Image: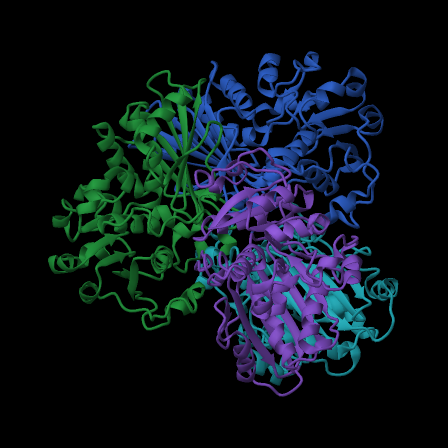
Chain colours: A green, B purple, C cyan, D blue
Amino acid sequence: MIRAGIIGSTGYAGAELARLLYQHPETEVVWCGSRSYAGERYSSVYQNMYQMVDADCRDDDLEKLSEEADVIFTATPQGYCASVINEGILSRAKIIDLSADFRLKDVAVYEKWYKLEHKAPEYLPEAVYGLCELHREEIRGTRLLANPGCYTTCSILTLYPLVKEGLVDPDTLIIDAKSGTSGAGRGAKVANLFCEINESMKAYSVATHRHTPEIEEQLSLACGHPVVLNFTPHLVPMQRGILVTAYGSLTGDYSWEDVRQVYEKYYGGEFFVRLLKEGVCAETRWVEGSNFADIGWKIDPRTKRIIAMGTIDNLIKGAAGQAVQNMNLMFGLPENLGLTQVPMFP
Amino acid sequence: MIRAGIIGSTGYAGAELARLLYQHPETEVVWCGSRSYAGERYSSVYQNMYQMVDADCRDDDLEKLSEEADVIFTATPQGYCASVINEGILSRAKIIDLSADFRLKDVAVYEKWYKLEHKAPEYLPEAVYGLCELHREEIRGTRLLANPGCYTTCSILTLYPLVKEGLVDPDTLIIDAKSGTSGAGRGAKVANLFCEINESMKAYSVATHRHTPEIEEQLSLACGHPVVLNFTPHLVPMQRGILVTAYGSLTGDYSWEDVRQVYEKYYGGEFFVRLLKEGVCAETRWVEGSNFADIGWKIDPRTKRIIAMGTIDNLIKGAAGQAVQNMNLMFGLPENLGLTQVPMFP
Amino acid sequence: MIRAGIIGSTGYAGAELARLLYQHPETEVVWCGSRSYAGERYSSVYQNMYQMVDADCRDDDLEKLSEEADVIFTATPQGYCASVINEGILSRAKIIDLSADFRLKDVAVYEKWYKLEHKAPEYLPEAVYGLCELHREEIRGTRLLANPGCYTTCSILTLYPLVKEGLVDPDTLIIDAKSGTSGAGRGAKVANLFCEINESMKAYSVATHRHTPEIEEQLSLACGHPVVLNFTPHLVPMQRGILVTAYGSLTGDYSWEDVRQVYEKYYGGEFFVRLLKEGVCAETRWVEGSNFADIGWKIDPRTKRIIAMGTIDNLIKGAAGQAVQNMNLMFGLPENLGLTQVPMFP
Amino acid sequence: MIRAGIIGSTGYAGAELARLLYQHPETEVVWCGSRSYAGERYSSVYQNMYQMVDADCRDDDLEKLSEEADVIFTATPQGYCASVINEGILSRAKIIDLSADFRLKDVAVYEKWYKLEHKAPEYLPEAVYGLCELHREEIRGTRLLANPGCYTTCSILTLYPLVKEGLVDPDTLIIDAKSGTSGAGRGAKVANLFCEINESMKAYSVATHRHTPEIEEQLSLACGHPVVLNFTPHLVPMQRGILVTAYGSLTGDYSWEDVRQVYEKYYGGEFFVRLLKEGVCAETRWVEGSNFADIGWKIDPRTKRIIAMGTIDNLIKGAAGQAVQNMNLMFGLPENLGLTQVPMFP
């Protein structure tokens, strides 16, 4: 059994991790960390786990935790993981960081977009970007895993093959993304009250959202030169689910089937990526509660653009599920172990 | 492996059955019946199962199905199962009927509330009412199982110990129940359109809902004389979840702890019933996606009434999950096999 | 033009008051008070009023406000109004208090349920309980108006004629009430976040909700002796709307039509009370955005109980709309002036 | 008083028209037409109007209606209005058609996108496209008004000044639009059931939505040459509201303020268009229940694109409200008469 600890286990992503790990056949959760609820019963904070999880919330002492765990998940605000990580911890436990601290290779880009000083740039070279479908081999060998953001996972999975194979002009990329509200976290803010979110939608962080450089970095790697694109997130009145609608100008006269073959080349063997049939648009409800990413696309002959649509459950493939997928890889387990749930509908 | 067939697999309860059975380690689904979608790809009707379920919808030939399956689930409208069942079918396969056809022992009561002639009253004596926590032993031995209704499961579980032990006066029982909209089914009706249901709530079938006699029959069995009560269902804008708020006059000066001991007596060893701590009210979100029933209660010293609150996921403990729990019992499997999902939140 | 001031204008009830008063043909809003947002643009807090309301939020100086206004609405927490009111203020402006400070005639009851010392009991005798349909004449003459609570308005309107005319046994009354989430206010609390409320429902404050004594006081006045009843509020994932399902044992063999005549006697001439036809249940959607109260009922011959169902928009008839209705009465205007909006659907 | 008739009064747009016209000070509704509900009480179909509207649904005899009404609103499926209109009708009553029959000047474009033969092309030249802010003068004089589509109203209002003044390159326009579900109509379809729409979102009619040529035609008029663009609608789980996020490459180095001046030039005097302050994104909740269009924008210096965001209530400014605004213009009334409702929140 892998002994797992979670720092930040009472946020939505942390709680989803707890839920998945408690159901994982090869994992034992040894530490539910929570600064806000330390000392309280975990199942009194997340009553869904009543009589299933028998633990109190603990503090966030990463040093001590690294002595008790084989793997540590940090589902914490930006800056935390970089500020506490050190060689001793990494020598004792593998780290899967769900924050952005080790996602971007360029410190300057991190500091510009996050407006934070990076406290551990020396670990950036060895950190591996944990989008499993793209970096599987590096993931297997790492001890420091940067788990991708929710929007970025969905955006990159949707666009990577098109950019990598040169089907779209990267200079024309526009990503219009929509998310359920669990992505906004469990902080007590007026803006996230039920009556403020329900029956409304809006764009936010337009042209400034922090997931932008992460998407750009990965797509730049794909095409070999710097990609600059528009990414616009929107908030929608539902719990879970991200839908990405991505637009790009085609570089040639490609058919739907041509595009399918390119997607197939990259995702044909992937358990968690489902390529939709022609005419089917991605819908968030069909992936809710699962680690799947569904991808569909449409070619518009009038404008010679492709409209590619991807969807994930932001808390699973966009956070906790992908973290478990990464853990499976890092510990030599079957990649989909504990992650084969059928999406729940309705 | 148990070979399972589903008649009515494209309604919400049927699809939930399919979802649970496909994830069940000892079951193989051999027949997804659907009169409406016969011949269509099952996963094109329920796209959540895309690339997981590789089958076409078949018709509803119960005779033929009984030759291919060990157990048949009928998630069909009232009257169907009674009209087709016969000795040959029952000799080849066990039947778990999710409709009301075999729930009520008294044909006259059935025909009065359902306004249907009962086509197979000869099977009523052997049919077992499948509320596992109350009738476990009979369930193990039956070949014809009447799976309880959603409201009834929640209502009976909440009230049974109180009535059985005489803590409440049965003549004073009032059950005010609220349900998410998946209970209304997948039929194309204006009344169930998103814009009609969303942002509204209402009572319906007041004093005439068909689950009333089912609740009354079981509670009458509990106390040994006929119970007549008020049951009022309400429709609420959410997917899943039933909440029952039940009122009854206490027959004595009982404390919260007295009541807890009575509940404990009946449910202390039950995996799927969670008795909440003092001061905690049942909330549907904490059972969503699971087979749990959560029960809490409050004593009002001013009125000398108890307010007992129970909640279930109507599609799981209220339908498909309980059907699988019954199947497990009928086939000698661990009762919670394939049903240990942690409730999903948010 | 009546000069109106609002203390607490940035809560949901206060903002609804602002919205109604700005559209009222005989009112001018001269003061939008808000302790939290003092100095900020009102329309930056409530962007719906952008370019319609040209004012900054002001503090809550009731003395000064009473020199500028003819009527003052206090949409403030319990205890505020009682702590600042005085003869000077009342001599200059009429007060419509949306809090509970002057609703209960018995100080001891107030202090017990609200756990607050009442700071101005000397004004209780002259305060008038502003349920317009029951106390119209006293309202016209008062300078201190206690605006009823949302649950209480709906509960009392639904039950008053039945209790007053002795059709139901008051000792058997059970009120099961459900509310949209705007009733929970605009405070930043985890419990009211979108993801916590959405897709769930629960009872709360069971047997202890503060609206209970208010309902009991008015119904006791109706029948002439003390009424003690059960009142259970529930929270439902929607914006606006209260639905009350009330149960009581009939004192005789009354028909639906008998009951209609009793309701008709009290509400036949009321603009804001709509008695529904036989077989029609109250639904919150049909009153949303209006000052209407819709009332329907069903008689259950099996249990000899009546199930009476009432619904209102909690922010309008349950708060701001009723406050305006009271203002109209207090200033000799047509009672429905500025309140004739057709409910908005969908 | 203007005598108004509505054909198709029991769809969502028709019912919103009824609601607005019954509250309009200069209008009398003389005919609520409904093929589906002919003979039924209008207020039994739309119970919100109970005791406010005293009429039965009538059939859709446009000839007869034209003898009783001064203005006729056709809120009917595509093809209906064109198939029944004639000189006699137009000589007796003004027609405001909420369908697409007279929106596109080019019959071939209509027939291609709508896959319908146009039955009255002879009236296309005189029909006026009723986007009031752009075609006010022609509207005043017409007897045949083509009321714009919901998506188109929001899209065109958002983009028109930018295209007209050459700030964006029309060849780069991408419109990503999101709508609440009332836009999908009141037909009984499985796809629009509560449980299918709730907790999900999707794109639909990608690259083929019929509002595309309407947007293109108006923007082509603006810039003087043919515009071809991408328009992608999405369905979101809420009642009302359209949000348009539009992307275009800037033709020069324009600042936020430069853009503001251009918007101001076109909308500075418009009652129903609200230009948002810098940094404020359009949110549907702030226009719900009103005839307002809110517009904001952001310039992305990294990609040299503008992201312009507009929002309307799809049933009001996107349908019924704009139709009333057009009626006001056509009958010489103040343009905002009966349309000054403050948006309702929450």
Q: Residue A245 lies in what quarter of the image?
A: top left
Q: Residue at x 62, y 50 (%)?
A: B74
Residue nearer the viewer, B268 or B342: B268
* Residue A115 visible (yes or no): no
- Counting labels gives 0
Q: Residue at x 48, y 54 (%)?
A: C56
Which x, y percent locates residue A40? 36, 72
- Above or below, D222 relative to D344: above
Residue nearer the viewer, C94 or C319: C319
Residue nearer the viewer, D337 or B236: B236
Which x, y percent locates residue A339? 36, 49
Q: Residue B186 lies in what quarter of the image?
A: top right
Which x, y percent locates residue D152? 55, 28
Q: Residue at x 64, y 66 (%)?
A: C177
Residue nearer the viewer, C55 or B234: B234
Which x, y percent locates residue D181? 58, 40
Asked if residue D285 lies left or right of residue D303, the reply is right
- Above or below, C245 relative to B261: above
Quarter of the picture containing the N terminus of chain A is: bottom left
- Above or below, D284 relative to A82: above
Asked if residue D252 lies left or right of residue D271, the reply is left
* Residue B296 visible (yes or no): yes
Q: Furthest residue to the bottom?
A: B253
- Above or below, C250 relative to D256: below
